[in-house]
Amino acid sequence: MIRKIGVLLCCILVILIAGSAFAQAPKKGGTLVFGRGGDSVGLDPAYETDGNSFMICDNVYEALVEYKDESTEIEPLLATSWQISPDGLTYTFNLRKGVKFHDGTPFNADAVVFSLGRQMKERNVKFFAKGWEIPKQDRPPEYWVSMEMDNTIGSIEAKDEYTVVFKLKRVEAPFLANLGMDFADIISPTAFMKDPKGFVRNPVGTGPYKFVNWVKDDRITLDAFKDYWGKAEGPYLEKIIFRAIPENAVRFLELKAGKIHICQFPNAADIPLAKKDPKLWVPTQPGMNIGYLGFNHKKEPWKSNKNLRRAIAHAINRKAIVDNIYQGMGQVAKNCIPPTMWGYNNDVPGYEYNVDLAKKLLAEAGYPEGKGLPEITLWSMPVARPYNPEGLKVGVAMIGDLAKVGISARIVSYDWGTYLKRQRQQPEDMDLFQLGWTGDNGDPDNFFAVLFDGLASEAVRTQWHSEAYHKMMLDGKQTIDQAKRADIYKKAQQLMFDEVPVIPIAHSTVMWPALKKVKNFKLHPTGSVRLKSVWLE
């Protein structure tokens, strides 16, 4: 009798385990509503730079390679394999067959040549078939330019329908990692050529979801792509709606009410509430990011007065900003890469909050107690970002700190698209500006060169011109040995501390609350929003 009961219990246990496993199998269908802080600027990955644009691109497009879940390790995507020549100057990619774009046209080597070749200043490209006459660019592709891709790629050639060869002008250590970034996404040449100017609002890629419509400043809708090549792994959702809800508190209330499924960038004070709510869970990721305060290096006195820049660095109470505005979701930054990244220089002391030192430096800069310095502008971001939860509140705190040393400042802000566009122009009415970055590929070059080497390109948002720093960036790109590269970047961080081209403010921890019915949602170190494998219970 006891044996029979034991057998019966074992059977029940097996059934329960099987039922549990069956219940957790991905389920197809449903509409996921993603609540975000702002609208996209555009949807052509070659020309965008903001996360709200890229999160759509992450689901509509694909690149030759991608980063693994919760990692920056490279794995194949539209390329199945690749070979690198012994001298590091030739990369040959073997492409995936049987892939279609959302418009039904085939993905092939010519599409790769078109997508990346259109960003070249001098288009040294060769198609396998007839190809296309690529239209002239209306504006520079900012990522391509700021990453010096024209100085890196000599030619792109389709050897046959499924083989692409890149010939490089120089060794580029992060080249493969760079090709996993959004700017390297592959678009449909046919769709682009139908309406080159309109493509920015009607994207066509090979991704798991296809674009449906865009109601400006309200929502973007995507549908599952039924002919997706990788459908064994998704997409599971039938539809995704990205809603723009600018107010953090309103966005969180919409989540609690069940009107959205994922809440991007809640107020820090709402995280404890989310953790206590039985209907919610809180995906968390250590931020591969930096929020910083920059100077207009095209304008005096910021361009040449290092003591003035240093005075401001010591005047701002960054710990109070992190404690009161980030509220446990960040840490004060010493350097402009996160401490988890290789090449981080822990010996850099960082700028201590010291009002007396700030006043002393201000006097040495020629502005005792701020006299002689006109009211300055401090541009503050209008949207929440991973590296800065509330730009306007941070701006208010900063101008309060500056007032304590005698510097008069006022906040300037615009809608997000205008803010990014005008900041890039380095206008005369901009003195200080808030910006930040979430790393694209896990390589220090993606922070140091792209963000701060003004000698590399006019497109770099911090137009700091330093010959010594520029040489370090070139050496870092062209050195293969990672330990030697790390030494280069450590010296660069010391130089930045000494010269104060920007003031590092904080690295944030990313927490995006979600309904518990949202399954398999994972935050990514790069800030990508990848929903292919997500499903609703």
Image (cartoon, rainbow, N blue to C red):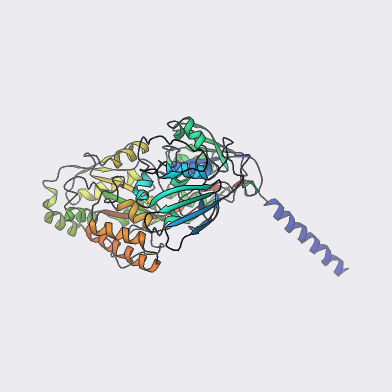
Q: Residue at x 31, y 43 (%)?
A: 380
The spot of residue 97 in percent (x, y) is: 60, 47
The spot of residue 244 in percent (x, y) is: 46, 37
What is the quadrant of residue 161 in the picture?
top right
Q: Is residue 198 above or below residue 328?
A: above
What is the quadrant of residue 484 in the picture?
bottom left
The spot of residue 479 in percent (x, y) is: 36, 63
Q: Is residue 69 above or below residue 494?
A: above
Q: Is residue 500 left or right of residue 203?
A: left
Query: Can the viewer see residue 529?
Result: no
Q: Nearer the viewer, residue 8 or 94?
A: 94
Q: Residue at x 37, y 57 (%)?
A: 170
The spot of residue 130 in percent (x, y) is: 51, 38
Q: Is residue 360 above or below residue 212?
A: below
Q: How many dots with numbers?
A: 0
Query: Can the viewer see residue 477?
Result: yes
Q: Nearer the viewer, residue 79 or 43?
A: 79
In the rendered image, the quadrant that contains the N terminus is bottom right
Q: Nearer the viewer, residue 301 or 100?
A: 100
Farthest residue to the right: give it: 1
Q: Is residue 381 left or right of residue 87?
A: left
What is the quadrant of residue 390 in the picture?
top left
Q: Is residue 217 left or right of residue 24?
A: left
